[in-house]
Amino acid sequence: QVQVAESGGGLVQPGGSLRLSCVASGSIFSINYMAWYRQAPGKERELVARISRSGSTNYVDDVKGRFTIPMNIADNTVYLQMNSLKPEDTAVYYCNAVVDGIDYWGQGTQVSVSS
């Protein structure tokens, strides 16, 4: 069994920064990749950023240049560094880990961007 847990959400003003953390724990042989998704009210869940075990990354267009997804593979931890936050970044952010070919999800953490 694998558990995925996020932390670090909160309320921030436009233009501010937040850093989300996610750790995968349990019976892990190999993490294939880890990713961050978000779901805003009334919208579908969307991929924000993903990083593979080899370190290759991809980002949704509207966060490029503002967000990064560093990973510490030794600790099964991934982060989402969010800079220059906008009100439209407000959403519940979910961590996704593909471990040994199986998808696991965290419970989500709320990020609110408002003045």
Image (cartoon, rainbow, N blue to C red):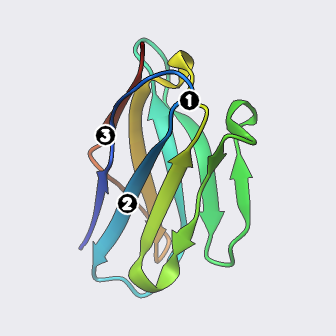
Identify residue type, mark 1: Leu
Q: Residue at x 40, y 81 (%)?
A: 75
Q: Residue at x 41, y 88 (%)?
A: 29
Rendered view: 11 above or below 21: above
Q: Decide: marks 2, 3 in contact (CB < 8 A)?
A: no
Residue 16 position in % (x across, y down): 51, 32
Q: Residue at x 58, y 64 (%)?
A: 70
What's the distance in space between the residues labelled 3 and 1, CA to CA?
16 Å
Which of 24/113 is in front? 113
User: Mark 3 or mark 1: which comes first in sequence?
Assistant: 1
Identify residue type, mark 2: Cys
Residue picked out by circle 3: 109
Rendered view: 98 above or below 20: below
Residue 99 position in % (x across, y down): 44, 72
User: Mark 2 or mark 3: which comes first in sequence?
Assistant: 2
Instruction: Give the SS element for disc 2.
Output: strand
What's the distance in space between the residues labelled 2 and 3, CA to CA?
10 Å
Residue picked out by circle 1: 85
